[in-house]
Every structure is written in structure tokens, then in C-alpha cells.
Amino acid sequence: MEELLPNLKYLGLALYLIFILRFLFLVFKACSDIYLYEYEHLPEQWEKDGKPRGIEFWKFPKPSWRDKYRLSAWRSGAISPMVWVFVTPKWADDHPEVQRYFVNLRTNVLWWSIGITIFFCLMVFTQT
């Protein structure tokens, strides 16, 4: 019985990690929805942002070999969502649909941050 208790702790931690990973995937989905909205409704802004593609990459045109290696393409896919957590871009002010995607992004980032912090605290306290 004493050997079973530590295994149950780690099983509980693993199940909790699986639960909070859901929020991380929802963050990726919200970013992808923002990119898709920008591509479909504001194509000139999408090109200006470096033609970012989300996790649903098959909905976007295939990038040329030059676009794959441009710094702006990497920046748009990696840096923009980190900034969007705190600041809404100007182009989204007049589009209520995309503002809902930004709310989803921020809400899921908040839940992911809280959840992963609790997870690491539980990891530290279950080591004793």
C-alpha cells in the first residue's frame, strides 16, 4: 500500500497536467482564429503582418520559399500573440468578431498561467 501512494500522486499530477494543457491548445486555437479572420477580412493587414499562419495551416495559402525564411514571418507567428495578450492591435478596434477571439486568447492565457503555476507548486510540495 505504501508503494501505491506515491504512484497515485504522480498519476494525479499527470491528469492535472492533461487538464491544463487544454487551455494551452485553446490559446493556439484563438491565435489561429485571429490569423484566419485577418486573412479573410483584412488581407492587406495580414500581408503587412508577415502572412502568419496558425495551427490550421491548410486554410492559408502555401508560403513561397522566400516567405518561409523571412524574419517578419517568424516574428508575426511568435511575437505577435505574446503582445496581443496585453494590447489589442488598432486594426481590431472596428471588428467585434475578432475582439471575441482576443478575449478568448486572454482568458485562456490567464487560466493556463494559473494552472501551470499550481502544477509546479504541486510538483515541489509532492517531492517531500
Image: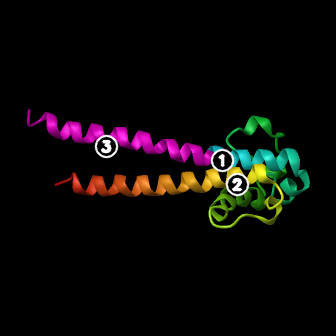
Whether residue 64 appears in this view of the structure is no
Query: Does label 1 or label 3 sit earlier along the sequence?
Result: 3
Task: Identify the residue at image location x=71%, y=57%.
Answer: 74
* Label 1: how many Cα within 10 Å (few below 14, some 14–19, many 20+): many
Q: Where's residue 53, x and y in %?
A: 74, 46
Q: Where's residue 82, x and y in %?
A: 63, 62
Reading the image, the residue beneath label 1 is: 30
Reading the image, the residue beneath label 2 is: 77
Query: Is label 3 in a helix, a strand or a loop?
Result: helix
Q: Which three-letter amino acid code belongs to the residue tagged 3? A: Leu
Residue 23 shown left or right of residue 59 in the figure: left
Camera-nearest residue between 72 and 17: 17
Query: Is label 1 in a helix, a strand or a loop?
Result: helix
Labelled disc at residue 13: 3
Query: Does label 3 or label 2 sit earlier along the sequence?
Result: 3
Q: Which three-letter amino acid code belongs to the residue tagged 1? A: Ala
Query: Is label 2 in a helix, a strand or a loop?
Result: helix
Task: Identify the residue at image location x=81%, y=54%.
Answer: 95
48 in relation to 59, above or below: below
User: Cβ–Cβ below 8 Å for labels 3 and 2?
Assistant: no
Quadrant in which the N terminus is drawn: top left
Q: Is residue 68 magenta?
A: no
Residue 62 shown left or right of residue 74 in the figure: right
Residue 15 shown left or right of residue 3 in the figure: right
Q: Which three-letter amino acid code belongs to the residue tagged 2? A: Gly
* Label 3: how many Cα within 10 Å (few below 14, some 14–19, many 20+): some
Measure the C-alpha gap from mark 1 to mark 3.
26 Å
Q: Is residue 4 magenta?
A: yes
Residue stretch rendered in magenta on the structure: 1-28
Q: Where's residue 9, x and y in %?
A: 23, 41
